[in-house]
Image (cartoon, rainbow, N blue to C red):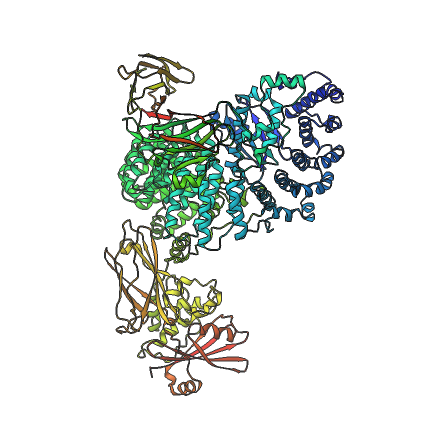
Amino acid sequence: MTDSKYFTTTKKGEIFELKAELNSDKKEKKKEAVKKVIASMTVGKDVSALFPDVVNCMQTDNLELKKLVYLYLMNYAKSQPDMAIMAVNTFVKDCEDANPLIRALAVRTMGCIRVDKITEYLCEPLRKCLKDEDPYVRKTAAVCVAKLHDINAQLVEDQGFLDTLKDLISDSNPMVVANAVAALSEIAESHPNSNLLDLNPQSINKLLTALNECTEWGQIFILDCLANYTPRDDRESQSICERVTPRLSHANSAVVLSAVKVLMKFMEMLPKDLDYYGTLLKKLAPPLVTLLSAEPELQYVALRNINLIVQKRPEILKHEMKVFFVKYNDPIYVKLEKLDIMIRLASQANIAQVLAELKEYATEVDVDFVRKAVRAIGRCAIKVEQSAERCVSTLLDLIQTKVNYVVQEAIVVIKDIFRKYPNKYESVIATLCENLDSLDEPEARAAMIWIVGEYAERIDNADELLESFLEGFHDESTQVQLQLLTAIVKLFLKKPTETQELVQQVLSLATQDSDNPDLRDRGYIYWRLLSTDPVAAKEVVLAEKPLISEETDLIEPTLLEELICHIGTLASVYHKPPSAFVEGSRGVMHKRLPARTGSGESTESPDVGTAAGGSAPEAAPSIIPSQGDLLGDLLNLDMAPPTTSGPPPPTTGMQMGGMDLLGGGLDSLLGGDLGGSPAMGAGFGAAPAVMPASLNAPVGGGLGDLFDLGGGVGMPMGAYIPPKIVWLPAMKAKGLEISGTFARRAGVIQMELILTNKAMSIMTDFAIQFNRNSFGLAPAGPLQVLTPLGPNQTIEVSLPLSTVGPVMKMDPLNNLQVAVKNNIDVFYFSCQYPISMLFVEDGKMERQVFLATWKDIPNDNESQFQIKDCHLNSDAASSKLQGSNIFTIAKRTVEGQDMLYMSIKLSNGIWVLAELRVQAGNPNYTMTTIRRSGS
Amino acid sequence: MIHSLFLVNSSGDIFLEKHWKSVVSRSVCDYFFEAQERASEPENVPPVIPTPHHYLISVLRHRIYFVAVIQSEVPPLFVIEFLHRVVDTFQDYFGVCTEAAIKDNVVVVYELLEEMLDNGFPLATESNILKELIKPPTILRTVVNTITGSTNVGEQLPTGQLSVVPWRRTGVKYTNNEAYFDVVEEIDAIIDKSGSTITAEIQGVIDACVKLTGMPDLTLSFMNPRLLDDVSFHPCVRFKRWEAERILSFIPPDGNFRLLSYHVSSQNLVAIPVYVKHNITFREGSSQGHFELTLGPKQTMGKGVEAVLVSSQLPRGVLNTNLNPTQGTYTFDPVTKLLSWDVGKINPQKLPSLKGSMSLQAGATKPDENPTINIQFKIQQSALSGLKVNRLDMYGEKYKPFKGIKYMTKAGKFQVRT
């Protein structure tokens, strides 16, 4: 006799029949009837009409019947709220039953009745149950608070249930603690700003104690809650880690993953040189590997999380490559994830194994998987340089199979390999061209066209090949059309004689016959370029392309950090921040990994370092006009201003009376900086935001730059530091790129350098030397590059400079010739330092002395400039200049004009006195400087 | 937390639904059905499916999809582990976990689900506790219940639920006190064409059946605990003692349970117990293929290899096979292209082999992929990793229990590429 009989009532008048049975006097019959009702309910039949009859059965001593009725109530109370009130009394009575099981059951069921009218009646019984002597009732009541909060949050707060719940965290029973934590976490999710789970060391201690004794589910809640805590220091962090590590051996994978989350987060605070840090890293690997031997669904979630962990800390699993090898009967979603992690773990040490596996996968049946495997081979080539050759030959083998989709994928990835290693593997182009006809996917076609265009000079019949594509131009996808247009233009630039017709054809197709604005615009641009300036066109179209990076698919570091804090959640499965997609988590606060606070050598977390290192070179654009010309113009005033595309010649402010070349050209230098030069003249007065910093910086950033600070670069009072620019491009120095700037910090001149290794081998043994220069600048110490610089690594060094070196007048005056040596070669470059760097701190002259000196100096030594469009009042200007050691001695106001008198002392003892006139409301300043030779 | 649960059978019908919070319309499963349609094989349905307002997390067990619906951020593993627990409980209660069994016991199923989760929070998932709350249906009990009108719902507060050893009920009494431990190891391996091992790892478990009176406290020690560096324990095991002394000390649950599972990692050398010689070729332009397979024992520590079953998914182009096994029986399903050969025991003196030809579909080109061979086998009385139990002691009770330990090695995912 089974329950299936309950499903077989399909007769007419079924409800009517049930009604009769429910109202029967016989207990047995009643129970059978309720069972039938429940069975109908489960298969989705509407039996809500029986509500009053079923509720009548509630008053019973029979526990099973009671439970069945409760089940029914929970389902239908919402649709029959008025009827549900009838049940309230029974609940209240049951909450005072002698049997804790009944009390718990009543409080549990009550919370499930989602009817507003009823909830009010439930507060009193709930309050009692929260303080019940039996922990089983307490823990059930704790969950009931969360249920009630879901129905009526205000009511829960008004009744003070939240405080009671917080008190339960200190309960003596671990189960109660766990449920209280779970309930609070759920409530907190809808109250992102409330301090419900206010964690402090005491409460953490209680949680850790409860962690050992509660059920597996409770452990998950507690661990997830722990993960939100930020320890005060590394010692607390370590002690929590020590108490959480045993959870890694739990049989429940969710416990394991939550423990991994806590450890990954708190590890961030441990100093890396600590022994415990290494131990912890070792302990993390086995549980992660074990997760992969579980059921496929668990594996999938685990793999998505491992993907994050591997990106954050590759060292944990670097020896475990083999567990990610794909078994042929893994579900497809597991296969694809494993493949992704294999590529992330690929390194020189294991690349041979990985490639052999990938090649094996490329012959499997599943098309998606095969495609991804072929792509993976390409990614390996880009990631591990030593393997590139092997990867290419593997890809060629695969192309020989002539399996259509394999060939297409292979061509797409070979294009990337060409971009990563130009001029290395072009010998395979012939093989690729053989497969031209079989390409039917836009991405593969576009890739092939790109290859043909890029290497047009080496492919004899490039024009024929491209012409064949051109026939069906209008049927191609945009991607292919754009690529074809560019490729033909490239071809034309390389072989102009024989392809004129072709290029005209494609340009007219793109510009006249196409509806696609992108295509048209690109066509017009090429057309104009080709017709006006073929040389420029060549420079633009055939410009050197940036190398593609090996890890284009890495998760962005800040997102990665946030995801690491959410290991084990849906966010980690989708690799999206939790705020982005889960409805329940409105306004979740962004979580961050804690910063390392240990006494260790570095106080910043490693990613911060790399992020800064990675972005710095970008900040230094390499378009620099040669400033030598500008100063040259200055010194030879009679020379005509450049007539080419340069900025218009200065229109104002060029009253350089008494040019004193003998005086070391100092005036001219200052003058140049202040607005004398053509380029400066244009740029100087412009609003700071418009003024391209890179144009100014090389000129040496004189006073003009100092004023430029008005743009609020973020250094309110400090000395002006021009942005870093590239001094030595990697092309000229066998892969070493140097960019830098000069700064004066705490009275010491610093040369701040960024060294980037863009070569493929390690660089060591760095040293630096200066040629003799105008102000005797010399390194005050050796170049501090202690660790070898690996490929694609960047290091920032600052080199303190002294001004006691040998002196030689340079032209321009602030030119500095530098030699840098490493294990590869010696490289030379020259750069210009801002003159303001040489202004010393004791440059404030006594007022009396100032007056006397001012009068003493002959007028010949005077020069005058105008500074345009400087929207600072005199006081702000004065304080700004003081930051760069230009001291205001006195200020006076004459006829609405502010006159500021200022003094500057250079490192070689030369004094410069200046007068700055500021007229209120007039953004143009007038500045007069006079110079006196060293006293 | 977990909102609702839908059970879906292989033909795509929802045959049971349970809601722990508000009712979620079953139309939410349409997203699941869509994913199911897209998947080529039933097991390829992705475990986590997003819908506009909910997330569906599913597991496929015994050809039933258990689809859980969640609305807020919930750890997916938590949900999956819970679903596993549901499956295990059903199996425990009804012997099998099938659509028929669930429908036959629908009331018990509901009572169980109601006890297992409260508002989405797990409540009672330990089999011991559940059995005290809701007695499993037996024929005898059903008969008795019908006659006496009693129920299969327990009257008492389940005592285990609050004790410090929630996994064990109190007042256990047996006339024969016995404790059996099975050390079962599964070897997962990938062997490449040339016969060399690409990966090999061992997943081991120690399953126990303990029927002891009172509150016994057991310790189990190993000859070579060093092997166990990656272990997951049942919550009853005292972790500190293991860390310090490498001894398993625990108060066992009553009845069957998994004491621990372990993993001997791919970095240790794993002995491969069988070898396969194979020669599967298709010739260009010919409609025939050659098939030859020989099995032999290797590193089995003197124990016989039994229950050997070879299966292989042949390429789609294969129409039929004509093969001769030297022992056992073989079948080939022309629809699914699955070849399976039930070998039985390997006799080291006379190695089993399967030879013959395969015919290809007319006009079919030479298949691109090479079939992978899957092998199942058992080796009794030996654990491949060499793990050995040293002794089992009991404290806390006076009687002398009967103890037994059994070892077995099985093939897990043992694959040979050709």
Quarter of the picture holding the C terminus of chain A: bottom left
Quarter of the picture holding the N terminus of chain A: top right
Residue A212, position as x, y percentages in the image: 50, 42
Say if residue A137 shows up in the picture: yes
Task: Identify which residue, A98 or A560, lies in the foreground.
Answer: A98
Q: Residue drawn at (48%, 22%), measured in percent from left and top?
A: B176
Q: Is residue A660 shown left or right of residue A217?
A: left
Residue A269, position as x, y percentages in the image: 44, 52
Say if residue A491 shows up in the picture: no
Image quadrant of residue B28? top right
Task: Identify which residue, A72 or B382, lies in the foreground.
Answer: B382
Image quadrant of residue A180? top right
Q: Is residue A60 shown left or right of residue A636?
A: right
Residue B333, position as x, y percentages in the image: 41, 15
Is the residue A412 above or below the residue A808 in the image? Answer: above
Q: How many marks?
A: 0
Task: Identify which residue, A317 or B106, lies in the foreground.
Answer: B106
Image quadrant of residue A784? bottom left
Q: Residue drawn at (42%, 43%), measured in percent from left and top?
A: A309
Task: Identify which residue, A482 or A716, lies in the foreground.
Answer: A716
Is the residue B211 above or below the residue A347 in the image? Answer: above
